[in-house]
């Protein structure tokens, strides 16, 4: 599928199921994809942070993209993260993803190295020039330490360098500045899964919710209620999802990082719901204990998902 | 060469010369290696931050290691950075570097992802187990946001998991805690190029100075004066190098990041000294202007290096 | 006035007008208070960050509270910031403010010192016990480096220790967690002046907008539209205020800090609108230039406020 | 006493003993002062972070200065912290301290508010102009979030605005830049109590060690060995103090902040050594448990101090 002029609705960041050995579990991956598309999502975001892109080898990344695009056959657009430290390395990932069938690439600002607005601008311009593909900026300061400047985003959008943004910065005021500029052909997607109704009230185009792996139907309902202007029922749906979200905190902060806990909870939930075969997460992440998995199950039951 | 029981002296993080197209300039790289070994350095650290490892593609990284190890033929030990976000990706780089002839690998804690001490420990243990090679920890919180805990370093050192540390944290008190523990077979290297005399007074084994690319003779003299206990003359030599260091700030902070400025200055100096052919830095870094290169030359002249 | 069970509507953080010598300009302060109450605000927040509380001497702080409470004579509730580093110092400020007629005090977590959740809890419990007055927590991590944990806030609210929160953290997901808990007798106020409609959609009680000094009528209209469930017109009003807000950035970032720029802009706007006599800000803040004040005037004209 | 042209030797940041009710325990304070001066310290720094200045009320601060200066009667110079958020408030503290007999004031950059180099410069210039007294800059980014720029420090030193600096930033390279500039009449003091020998090797003038409350004799010996150029024995003395320092970590990080733990340990040690009557720390700090105090005693015994 080629990219639509504007991405809307729910575009979940697809978890990457793994075998107990840590390889990509392609069977489970395709069941997950069907689970998502069957719920009515309007696109898929592969190789994002929720997909454990930071942990996947180059081979694993390629497998994910090729497996999914071959299966989908163009039914919904596929975005692929090209996540690495700087332009030359991001370009390598972007080319592989595009060759594998992705419709667009998603890239952060440079990280690990100390960067600068002029370098960030150059980075995105080079990505666009050298791939020729739609490029979305991924604003994720928790991971890359640099908040994307809304003014730079808007300048790059107006120049046709950026086709969109996935905003996971949590900075709703900056997001609003981007939304209200109303750049044509530029898609504004929020990654803040607990603020979907408010983002759509502000005018955001779509949502990329990690929790959407677990309850894609809920997020699809939520975006449709917003599109219909039914803000009261939208709020209720959002609050239902809000009550489900604390599953990401069941993993003990004394034993593991917040990444291990949240990815571990999503995968545990997907396994409990029968979507994937194993809840394995990549090294060096720490697995949830049985007791913690039991608490994930409790959240699912309370939400009527188990 | 196999690794010595303890690394000492000067082990510079070797700059990666590039052609104007951004490829590794292997001819210049070997001239730089000869420039360093000719000055009496006791090892080389390839693919560190000063080597622009964050910018090098996988192919470029392999070229650097293979070019240098083939040339050296074991005369000094070669350390290679295996710099990536998490264990599976670091392992891929480590295996390639070791296959290419490196004697040891240097790795940071996980980054991009939110990590935890238990995950950091697991990360280094897996690197050691799965490579079988000497692993040095690279403490670089400016790049990876997490300061290595000295207690964890010492535990991993005592267990034989870590063969050493390259400390670029700037935290001299934490460094001292590691040094004074005096773990046998564990090398403590400081990356703080302006604090070599004081690190060696504390008992550090060696130094990994970025500025050592530009003036390796100075750093070799400095470590020898320290080894001889001549702290007054060591201080004078260190102060001479301190006066040379501000070359890293000639690049305008309004136009570029501090990485562009410092790597740009080192490469400009190496070109001015006739060691390498081009001062090209990798994308998306911003090049020094002619006026700024002129100021680098001024520093070299003042130091008697041009 | 005694405190209402729940604070709602617009409770602006009142700027502190100063004479050219830096003393509190009580005449201008009372004109500003009349400007705000005349617009229909439902309370006043004195001695907040927008009030330059960090710059006011103890004498200046006392003057502000006593001047305003004597003038108002109980017509709207008066909240007063008791802003200092730790419990004993905050208690001194709180007692002075309450003696001066304030109805409630607003306090941050400890700062300057390295703090801990157990110390934060003890801090608020002691403030409540030793003043006997309503205490609101002021969540302002930009100033105090520590984000208030929503779980702690809710526990203190449920215990009757906290009467409310002024959330200026920008973290809308955490704010939503507090709101949806729905603690009785606990007021949730947002300080995010560009996200009022979305905060009220989520269920927040009221808003503490710095920009409300400049356009209190706009904020009162906005909260009334939200209360009426007219989210489309609320969004339009919010977007109008969004367009006014960039006045806080006219002060050159090369010459001054963001505090100087934002407070300077608010005071320049109030002087231009004839509400206060001088735009003086406290030392060591840098004043806006005439050209920058001219740009503030441009924003006011564009918004129909001049 | 008037200030010497250059401060040298050991100038401990004096702990503030408190009664169980949290008032300044003046009897214990004077015993502590005698303990310090008897050991040969060359000055006293009152109202620093180690003195719990952030917790002391205005009255408590005044009591500390007046009590100590009346007792000393000019035998050693007395520096007093004037610690508050901005210029007007710092000036109030500075005037009180000078009126109370302090010989110089020590001030940080503005905090709580977002600051800027131009404002920091203005801050120190105003402090100097309006007090007429010697002003030392206190570089403590952990508390105030802003690292003092060495170039600004040197410019203010050269202009006679600053009489010295107390560097607790931990940034030894920046400290070295200031030291090597060699500004006449400007005293460079390090607050890094584990890096005294190396700081003095670099050329620092003196040291302000929190641990010097517990073992002033050790620090006096250490600085004398350095002054004599006996770097080997200096290192041994420093390593002995290094082994004593972990007492600051006996307080459980699960129960308390690092401030509570370190101040609590110093006060427990002083009480165990019979210098002060109570180990009380100010609210809302968490006290050490009996078991933790027992571990402090263990460190003292191991060091021959009990």
Image (cartoon, coloured by chain):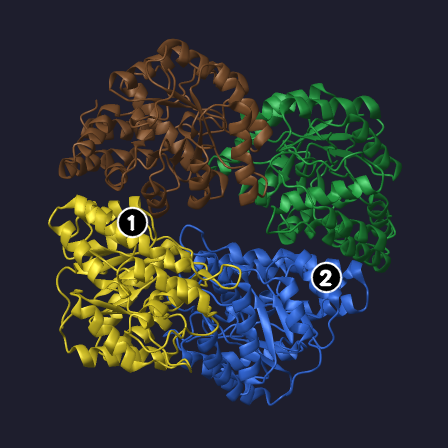
Chain colours: A green, B brown, C blue, D yellow
Q: Which chain does tag 2 point to?
A: C
Residue B201's place in the image compared with A196, above or below, is above
Q: Residue C197, labelled with which disc?
A: 2
* Residue C304, quarter of the rendered image: bottom right
Q: Gap between marks 1 and 2, in whole Å? A: 46 Å
Which residue lies under the disc numbered 1?
D150
Element at label 1:
helix
Q: Is residue B5 left or right of residue D251?
A: left
- Dot 2 alpha-carbon crowd within 10 angstroms: few under 14, some 14 to 19, many 20 or more: many
Q: Are marks 1 and 2 on the same chain?
A: no
Q: Position of residue B187 (x, y in %)?
A: 35, 32
Q: Is residue D202 left or right of residue D272?
A: left
Q: Position of residue D152 (x, y in %)?
A: 29, 52
Q: Is residue D77 visible?
A: no
User: Of A131 and A35, which appears nearest the observer?
Assistant: A35
Element at label 2:
helix
Q: Which chain does tag 1 point to?
A: D
Residue D219's place in the image compared with A158, above or below, is below
* Residue A68, quarter of the rendered image: top right
Residue at x 63%, y 36% (from the top left corner): A137
Residue D299's place in the image compared with A161, above or below, is below
- Of badges 1 and 2, nearer the viewer stands 1
User: Of B153 and C223, which appears nearest the observer?
Assistant: B153
Residue at x 16%, y 58% (from the top left corner): D8
Residue at x 63%, y 57% (from the top left corner): C171
Residue lying at the far left of the rendered structure: D228
Residue B173's place in the image compared with A58, above or below, is below
Q: Position of residue B283 (x, y in %)?
A: 49, 26
């Amino acid at each position: 599928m080629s990219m639509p002029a504007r991405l809307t609705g729910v575009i979940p960041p697809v978890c990457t199921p793994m075998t107990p050995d840590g390889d990509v579990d392609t069977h489970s991956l395709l069941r997950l994809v069907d689970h998502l598309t069957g719920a009515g999502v309007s696109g898929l975001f592969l190789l994002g942070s929720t997909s454990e892109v930071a942990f996947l080898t180059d081979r694993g990344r390629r497998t994910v993209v090729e497996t999914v695009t071959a299966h989908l056959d163009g039914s919904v657009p596929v975005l692929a993260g090209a996540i690495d430290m700087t332009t030359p390395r991001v370009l390598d990932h972007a080319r592989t993803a595009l060759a594998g069938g992705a419709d667009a690439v998603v890239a952060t600002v440079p990280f690990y190295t100390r960067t600068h607005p002029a370098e960030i601008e150059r980075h995105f311009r080079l990505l666009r020039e050298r791939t020729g593909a739609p490029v979305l900026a991924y604003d994720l300061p928790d991971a890359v330490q640099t908040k994307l400047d809304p003014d730079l985003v808007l300048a790059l959008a107006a120049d046709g360098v950026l086709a969109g943004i996935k905003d996971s910065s949590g900075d709703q005021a900056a997001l609003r500045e981007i939304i209200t500029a109303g750049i044509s052909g530029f898609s504004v997607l929020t990654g803040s899964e607990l603020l979907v109704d408010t983002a759509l009230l502000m005018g955001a185009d779509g949502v990329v919710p990690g929790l959407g792996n677990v309850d894609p139907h809920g997020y699809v309902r939520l975006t449709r209620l917003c599109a219909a202007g039914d803000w009261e029922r939208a709020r209720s749906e959002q609050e239902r999802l809000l009550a489900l979200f604390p599953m990401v905190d069941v993993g003990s902060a004394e034993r593991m990082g917040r990444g291990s806990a949240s990815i571990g909870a999503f995968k545990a939930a997907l396994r409990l719901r029968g979507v994937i075969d194993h809840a394995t997460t990549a090294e060096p992440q720490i697995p949830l204990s049985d007791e913690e998995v039991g608490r994930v199950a409790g959240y699912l039951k309370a939400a009527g998902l188990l």
